[in-house]
Image (spheres, rainbow, N blue to C red):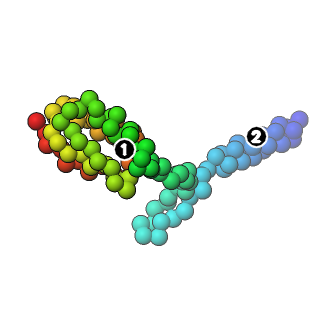
């Protein structure tokens, strides 16, 4: 009887050890610091989509229509903003422009 409970105890210890061992992550030593570092995989990012100039120009005109002092031009995917705008209205304009996915935004606006 003691032999059976000893076998059960050994099996439980073995099972607990294997579960704990399986939960460990792969770690490697950093050669420069000597510290353990965990391996982390990051998802690959997709390329950024840049809108073509024709559709971007149309969308930019629509986005800036509520800002009478602002002029926007598009060249090679880059938007250049010129003119004047109130400081409190700038964040909303910039958000609208960036949502159109230009290659770059050149902000030459003067704040009032």
Q: Callout 2: 10 Å neighbours few (<14), some, many (20+)?
A: few
Kindly identify the residue that appears in the image at 60 percent across and 56 percent down.
Answer: 26
- Depth check: give the residue in front, 112 or 34: 112
Residue 42 in view here: no
Residue 66 in view here: yes
Indicate whether 16 appears above or below 65: below
Quadrant of the snapshot with the N terminus: top right
| For residue 65, side relative to residue 24 (left or right) | left
- Depth check: give the residue in front, 82 or 54: 54
Kindly identify the residue that appears in the image at 10 percent across and 36 percent down.
Answer: 112
Kindly identify the residue that appears in the image at 41 percent across and 66 percent down.
Answer: 33
Q: Residue furthest bottom?
A: 31
Q: Callout 1: 10 Å neighbours few (<14), some, many (20+)?
A: some
Which label belongs to residue 39? none
Indicate whether 112 appears above or below 18: above
Q: Are marks 1 and 2 in contact (CB under 8 Å)?
A: no
Q: Residue furthest left?
A: 112
| For residue 60, side relative to residue 32 (left or right) | left
- Depth check: give the residue in front, 4 or 90: 90
According to the picture, the residue beneath numbered tag 1 turns out to be 57
- As helix, strand or loop, the secondary structure at mark 2 comes to helix
According to the picture, the residue beneath numbered tag 2 turns out to be 12
> Mark 1 or mark 2: which comes first in sequence?
2
| For residue 8, side relative to residue 102 (left or right) | right
Pinpoint residue 39: horizontal percent, then vertical percent: 55, 56
Pinpoint residue 72: horizontal percent, then vertical percent: 27, 44
Pinpoint residue 51: horizontal percent, then vertical percent: 44, 47
- Between circles 1 and 2, the one closer to the viewer is 1
| For residue 10, side relative to residue 77 (left or right) | right
Kindly identify the residue that appears in the image at 32 percent across and 38 percent down.
Answer: 61
């Amino acid at each position: 009887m003691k032999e059976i409970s000893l076998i059960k105890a050994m099996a439980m210890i073995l099972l607990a050890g294997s579960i704990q061992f399986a939960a460990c992550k792969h770690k490697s030593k950093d050669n420069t610091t000597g510290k353990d570092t965990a391996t982390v995989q990051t998802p690959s990012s997709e390329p950024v989509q840049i809108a073509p100039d024709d559709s971007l120009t149309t969308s930019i005109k629509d986005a800036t229509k509520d800002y009478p002092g602002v002029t926007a031009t598009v060249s090679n995917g880059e938007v250049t903003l010129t003119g004047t705008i109130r400081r409190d209205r700038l964040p909303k304009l910039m958000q609208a422009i960036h949502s159109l996915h230009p290659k770059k935004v050149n902000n030459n606006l003067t704040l009032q």
